[in-house]
Image (spheres, helix red, strand yellow):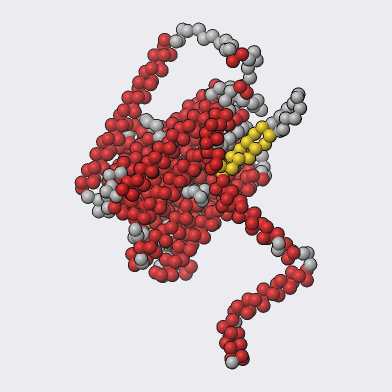
Amino acid sequence: MRLNIYKLSFQALIFFIVIISSYFSINALSGNRFEYIVYGGYVFDNIPLRIDALSGWMILIINITMLTGSIYGMKYLKHYEKRKANLAMHYVLIPFFHISMLMVCIVQNFLAFLVVWELMAISSFLLVILEYWKKETINAGLNYMIQSHIGIIFLTIAFIWVISQTGSYDFKSIETFSAKMAPEMGILLFVILMIGFGFKAGFVPLHTWLPYAHPAAPSHVSGMMSGVIIKLGIFGILRTLLLIKGNYLIIGEIILLVSVLSGLYGVILAIVQHNLKKLLAYHSIENIGIIGIGIGIGTIGLGLKNDFLAVTGFTGGLLHILNHSLFKSMLFYGAGNVYQATGILNIDRLGGLIRTMPKTASMFLVASLAICGLPPFNGFISEFLIYSGLFAGLKSESFAFSLLILLVIIGLVMIGGLALFCFTKAFGIVFLGSARSEYSKEPKEAPIQMLLPQYLIAALILAIGLFPQYILKLLLNPVLLFLPQLSKNVTDVYFAKLSVLSSIGFTGFIIILLFSAIYFIRNRVQRKRVIEISQTWSCGYTAPTPRMQFTASSYTKTYSNIVKPLLKTNKTETEIISIFPIEAEYSYSFYDKMEYLLIDKNLKLLKKFLYKLDFLQNGRIQSYAMYGLFFIVLIILFTYMEYLSKFLFDFFR
């Protein structure tokens, strides 16, 4: 009874937060800024709360994802009611997490921002470790928490630098500070802030927490984190770009190179994953790369004073933030349906679920097509805009710059092609064919409460793909923040681009009608046809088994051999030594080589160093008392170092 009260209360609170914050969001997107100063006392000083068009766009995305995630989560968590999970605390944390993310978009005081950023990290950490009795869940949560705090260290360094020079805690002081400093210092400040926000966004090589946190978290939390929390890292970078006055050309090139690396590396690792949620986590890194490419193109447009380049880049990047939050949260909800129906996330052990879970399969397919950037879905629209900016950049008079843009286009094409390959594997192996292992229970379709959020998201995905001109009009004011002096000529070009996209949407609508007509005619023609099921030849096998099907590993075998130098391979195999071999085992998995080189090796060195100091922990009380006395003396010496140095100087003189 008490748990049901928590459920209803938390859902009502989420609805209330969504309604109130959406009011301010829509006003901001319409061009009406909100600003209010809160007195924060002696510690915080004045705390400006500001909602401009960029904040409004992010608030809208947060609300959509939190609303669908909370509806999905209510039914998904039913699975945990008989386990050790503290569901009451989980229900309380979700609105707290929601509010902290909204405040990140609103608060513009350095110290207060760090507080709400920390609250967001802590609340999301507690949501991730719902299954705290599992060792891998705790490890994933701690990994996420540690890397979040490394990011906070970089943000703190940048903020202290600005405060020391301006004496102000207001975000606007970044603009004042960067306007006075040398351009090189502006680039350095941006790089420090980008690293701090990049940990949350998941840019390579700051990405290593994502593949652990997403599989460990409940599916609705994975959807929320991938849908919005990593986008707040992007929001931080965008807010920095609005404030820093530096060499936009170099800053844009930095963003572009990091983004292409992230997109390619993310999709390369996604393809070889066996865990469905881990595969989706690496695709989050890939899509952060696509968003970054759009932002990089927009920033280069600012540096070159090419308004069309800036408009298409920022519009494509901002739209892809929304698009990714939609189809990626939907994919995680689909993975949650599969997990609750089968208890399995290993793709090699799944199969044939389209027969028992046709609605989940349909929704997963829609999201898969959208994330691959295929029309008539939303992913195509944002990627089309980014490609438009890239092709416009090819016309540059600088050969070096044109070559850079050409390489970025090739990289984006490869990202799209590899994503398509990955999701043919994911959908084909999980939902088509026959089950590759025995399920503990007969899989059943997810209940309507878990399907409804996916239907809502699918409707939005199609709406953006078919009618992009309406959603892009909402983006005009956020884009104008980066181009306050946008000329009338470029505004006309912008709306001309909208008319092109409306034509694309109309073409997509025709494709859907043709597909529906063919499907309807086929069903009418075959309605009275008798369906016969018979044994196929099966390549000479008289007793075919599901193990004869492609697995995820065999499907990507050739690809795995090509990219093996980029990955670290772990093998498990049984050596066959007799004529009549016993049952053998062979399996392999791929490990992130960048994680191994940057984290694992350094952790081993740190452990090796710490082991040499284990003599300090010898169990003797006298030694521990001596340590305390030693540090007290050390503190006194440091405190009076000036007087001591003067005394020694006078003494020896």
Task: Give the x, y percent position of residue 366.
Answer: 45, 30
**What count of labels does the image hold?**
0
Front-most of residues 40 and 388: 388
Observer able to see residue 186: yes
Front-most of residues 491 and 462: 491
Residue 18, quarter of the rendered image: top left
- Direction from residue 598 to residue 262 in the image, left or right: left
Residue 46, quarter of the rendered image: bottom left
Quarter of the image containing the C terminus?
A: bottom right
Task: Give the x, y percent position of residue 135.
Answer: 67, 45
In percent of the image, x 53 and y 24: which residue is there? 432
Front-most of residues 33 and 417: 417
Residue 441, quarter of the rendered image: top right
Task: Give the x, y percent position of residue 394.
Answer: 30, 44
In percent of the image, x 47 and y 59: which residue is there? 155
Q: Hey, which residue is sitting farthest left in the picture? A: 489
- Direction from residue 176 to residue 275 in the image, left or right: right
Quarter of the image containing the N terminus?
A: top right
In percent of the image, x 37 and y 30: which residue is there? 376
- Direction from residue 141 to residue 59 in the image, left or right: left
Observer able to see residue 451: no
Front-most of residues 368 and 601: 601
- Quick check: 517 above or below 72? above
